[in-house]
Image (tube, rainbow, N blue to C red):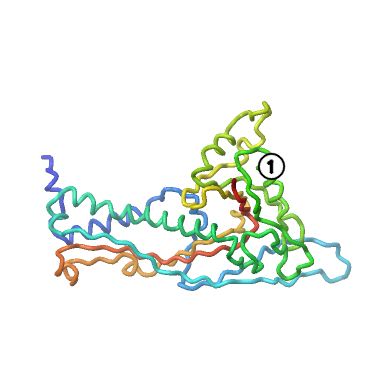
Amino acid sequence: MASLFTNELLPATTEEAIREFNEKYLAVISAAPAPTWADRFVIGVGAPRVTFPISLMSTKFLETKEATSRVRTMMEQDFDLKVVEFDAGYEAKALEVLTNSFAYRNWSAVPERFRIGEGRHVCKQLATLLEAGTSTASPWDAVNFFSASHLANPSDSSLGTFSNYQASGTDPNSISNLTAEITAMRGVLDENGDKLGIEPDEIWLPTGKFQAVSNLLNQQMIANGESNPYLGKLKPIHVPDLSDVNDWYLVDSKAIGMGIDPMVAAKFQPSDSLGLRFFDEASDFFKTTGKLKVTNHLWYGFRLVFPHAIRRVTGA
């Protein structure tokens, strides 16, 4: 079969260009996205406003003193989360898309740009939430999300408090500093006032801190000739979306996997026509400009939730 020249691969009509765009977009969103540190916090919701229950329900067995069993009333709290619409878009001259291979290539790359842009959007929004956590009330107990005095049980203040915040400047590039902060994080309490069993296995770092700490954690031996106690036990994760160049976070990924999420990115997906919108030859935009335009619309709501599985440390 004879080879086709590049210009013969171009769409013959704007309708064909839009159809090809749709096919590429569906292929992109169906493929596995490039992983980011924030992926685990994205959940799909079925409405633009959702009520989330918030309770650890930590079970504690006590000796039976009566014929009837002891039961606890579930003092479950909740919070409402509303999604907000976000959008981004591109436009291109229809004549160039139909006749210029470079313009067509750029047009064909837009679906992938939308997917990458959505991932970056979620990362930036969640990083912004984290950095505002010292002045944002937690839905758990109505104190600041990062605080040294969280209530173990919001319904019973007699069960004690715990901390998920170190306000003193602390350098993460130090085994002794890491040991002190990990030990402090193990003191997080459950609803009964007992240790929850938090065991941090990740450390989230801004760009300026990441490489040095990563090098430290991956050394077989530390400076004094002893074995590295955190080799393979504490995973360094680069969070480039953090704007603060010093602060860092200890995280228990296993607790997050059990549902103790420090934050949530709720994604609402309405009808396809509301998500991806084309301005084709029938639109006034095209009749005025001679351009094709496509916009992608997202609906997300972001919120801090449980303060238990994450600890913020002011960096130095």
In terms of image quadrants, where is residue 62? bottom right
The residue to which callout 1 is attached is: 179
Residue nearest the observer in this picture, 304 or 47: 304
Q: Looking at the rendering, in which quadrant would you find the C terminus?
A: top right
Q: Left or right of 40: which side holds 252? A: right
In the drawing, does residue 14 fall left or right of residue 56? left
Residue at the image position 52 percent from the left and 52 percent from the top: 244
Residue 38 percent location from the top left of the image: 49, 53
Q: Is residue 172 above or below residue 133?
A: above
Q: Quadrant of the N terminus?
A: top left
- Local crowd size for mark 1, using a 10 Å CA cut-off: few (<14), some (14–19), many (≥20): some
- Residue at x-position 78% and y-position 64%: 159
Give me the residue at 50% from left, 48% from top: 239
Percent position of residue 68, x then y: 84, 71
Q: Residue furthest top?
A: 225
Q: Nearer the viewer, residue 230 or 70?
A: 230
Q: Position of residue 193 (x, y in %)?
A: 76, 60
Amino acid at pointer 1:
Thr
